[in-house]
Image (cartoon, grey):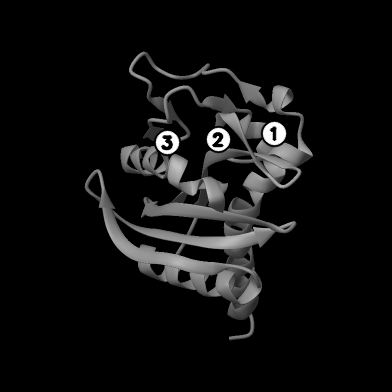
């Protein structure tokens, strides 16, 4: 029995790191990296505006740039060219896709990670948690509001598990600017397909 506990704990730790990284990753996207070094202008989009790679297809918002996913350790990232200001800081809304191998099914994966996130991220407040279907695949939409460096951020995540891989598509924006981008974020999440 004791041999299985560390494996389970390691999987939970890995999942927790990915979810927390997605939530706060958007905040550090602008501050930790020079945007010009990590934005590739629309290269990689097909003629119909679809991004295809890493086992999935997705339609990012029109005009959003494709970021350097490898440098940011994500499967794909799309960055809003518009900078939003809050206090003295600048933030670019973004949508990222992360994938990881999993042994759990969808329900268990999402439930476990949501519980860990809510226990560990003190400022995180869940705003939504519901089953959904996207392009014929079962998934979950979860979202929340959280504070980072005194700024309020909001995100919405689509989580799909297929073929032993979890795909987490996350849209993040300043909470104050959420209403400006929620339709674009929702449309992109709804376009996700394998």
The location of residue 156, given as percent across then percent down, is 45, 53
Is residue 165 visible to us here? no
Q: Is disc 2 placed on a helix, strand or loop?
A: strand
Dot placed on the residue nearer the N-terminal end, 3 or 1: 3
The residue under label 2 is: 77
Quick one: which residue is furthest to the left in this view? 136
Dot placed on the residue nearer the N-terminal end, 1 or 2: 1
The residue under label 3 is: 55
Marks 1, 2: nearer the viewer: 2
Front-lying residue, 152 or 19: 152
Q: Residue at x 59, y 67 (%)?
A: 124
Left or right? Give the position of 188 relative to 23. left
The residue under label 1 is: 71
Left or right? Give the position of 7 relative to 171. right
Is residue 181 visible to us here? yes
Crowd around label 1: few <14 · some 14–19 · many ≥20 (10 Å): few
């Amino acid at each position: 029995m004791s041999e299985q506990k560390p494996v389970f704990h390691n999987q939970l730790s890995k999942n927790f790191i990915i979810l927390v990284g997605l939530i706060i990753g958007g905040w550090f996207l602008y501050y930790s990296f020079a945007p010009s070094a990590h934005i590739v202008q629309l290269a990689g989009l097909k003629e119909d505006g679809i991004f295809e790679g890493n086992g999935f297809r997705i339609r990012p918002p029109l005009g959003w740039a494709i970021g350097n996913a490898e440098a940011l350790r994500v499967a794909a990232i799309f960055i809003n060219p518009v900078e939003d200001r809050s206090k003295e800081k600048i933030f670019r809304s973004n949508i990222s896709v992360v994938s990881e191998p999993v042994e759990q099914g969808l329900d268990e994966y999402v439930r476990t990670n949501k519980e860990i996130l809510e226990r560990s991220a003190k400022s995180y407040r869940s705003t939504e948690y519901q089953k959904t279907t996207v392009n014929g695949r079962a998934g979950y939409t979860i979202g929340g509001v959280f504070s980072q460096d005194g700024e309020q951020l909001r995100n919405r995540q689509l989580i799909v598990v297929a073929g032993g891989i979890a795909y987490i598509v996350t849209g993040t924006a300043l909470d104050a600017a959420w209403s400006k981008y929620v339709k674009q974020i929702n449309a992109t999440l709804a376009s996700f397909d394998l």
